[in-house]
């Protein structure tokens, strides 16, 4: 089955996700028949990609003793009962307090909020650190928005705002920097033209290695 998703893009694109979903992204107003014909025209690529896709990462577990990543390092969750929900990092252990330690939803909520606080701090610092490399005036510094996204690590709006995936905070810092530089380079070239990649090569020469490391992280942790 192929899902159709209308976006603000100008061309049609075909995507295969780790869980086997196939999605064709089209400009708004594109007839469904045109989208399906586009997907069928790439049937050979689709069959090969689906057949060779790596196994999906394991489903996360939200309980005492579970392992979750932060900046590329695995943390062990230690869940304890308490009226006040809180999270505290101590070395490689993340202590979580929830009213009922067996309530996986509550544990997940506390962990997600801890990730979000960390993301605001880390992403903001890295964005400010890399922005001067663009050579743009200080007042062009983009705003930052953090969202839990399903299919992309980041995006840059035509108005100059940078969106970063909340779950990027789980990846190594080198990978976080790669995504931030990628989105910042869109302030110079709002496309993926050779000029765009020339900026990537200039600012972050090893970006391809970092991209591969991010893919490896995604395969392990999701």
Image (cartoon, grey):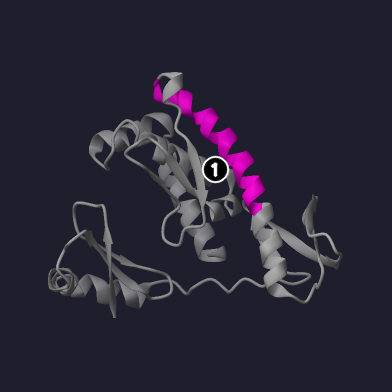
Residue at the extreme bottom of the image, as rendered:
1
Q: How would you classify the magenta stretch by its main secondary structure? A: helix
Q: Residue 167 in magenta?
A: no
The answer to whether residue 100 is left or right of residue 155 is right
Relative height, residue 102 to residue 182 (above, below): below
Q: Nearer the viewer, residue 24 or 117?
A: 117
Counting from the top left corner in percent of width and height, residue 31 is at: 14, 68
Relative height, residue 91 to residue 198 (above, below): below
Relative height, residue 90 to residue 64 (above, below): above
Viewer can see residue 94: no
The answer to whether residue 157 is left or right of residue 149 is left
Give the quadrant of residue 27. bottom left
Q: Nearer the viewer, residue 67 or 152?
A: 152
Counting from the top left corner in percent of width and height, residue 178 is at: 47, 42
The residue pinned by badge 1 equals 174
Magenta stretch, residue numbers: 115-136
Q: Quadrant of the N terminus?
A: bottom left
How many marks do you count on the picture? 1
Q: Residue 120 in magenta?
A: yes
Give the quadrant of residue 46. bottom left
The answer to whether residue 173 is left or right of residue 132 is right
Residue for point 22% across, 61% down: 26
Give the quadrant of residue 25. bottom left
Counting from the top left corner in percent of width and height, residue 4 is at: 26, 70
Counting from the top left corner in percent of width and height, residue 103 is at: 74, 75
Viewer can see residue 107: yes
Residue for point 59% across, 33% down: 125
Helix, strand or loop at mark 1 = helix
Residue for point 17% across, 72% down: 32
């Amino acid at each position: 089955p192929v899902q159709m998703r209308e976006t603000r893009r100008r061309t049609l694109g075909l995507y295969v996700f780790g869980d086997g979903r196939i999605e064709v992204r089209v400009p708004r107003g594109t007839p469904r028949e045109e989208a399906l014909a586009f997907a069928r025209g790439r049937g050979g690529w689709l069959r090969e990609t689906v057949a060779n896709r790596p196994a999906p990462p394991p489903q996360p577990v939200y309980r005492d003793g579970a392992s979750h990543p932060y900046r590329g390092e695995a943390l062990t969750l230690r869940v304890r009962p308490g009226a006040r929900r809180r999270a505290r990092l101590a070395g490689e252990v993340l202590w979580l307090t929830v009213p009922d330690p067996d309530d996986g939803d509550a544990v997940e909520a506390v962990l997600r909020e801890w990730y979000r606080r960390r993301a605001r701090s880390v992403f903001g610092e890295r964005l400010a650190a890399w922005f001067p490399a663009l050579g743009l005036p200080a007042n062009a510094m983009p705003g930052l928005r953090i969202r839990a996204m399903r299919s992309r690590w980041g995006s840059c709006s035509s108005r100059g705002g940078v969106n970063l995936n909340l779950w990027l905070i789980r990846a190594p810092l080198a990978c976080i920097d790669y995504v931030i530089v990628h989105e910042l380079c869109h302030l110079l070239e709002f496309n993926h033209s050779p000029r765009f990649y020339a900026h990537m090569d200039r600012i972050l020469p090893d970006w391809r290695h970092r991209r591969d490391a991010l893919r490896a992280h995604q395969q392990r942790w999701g």
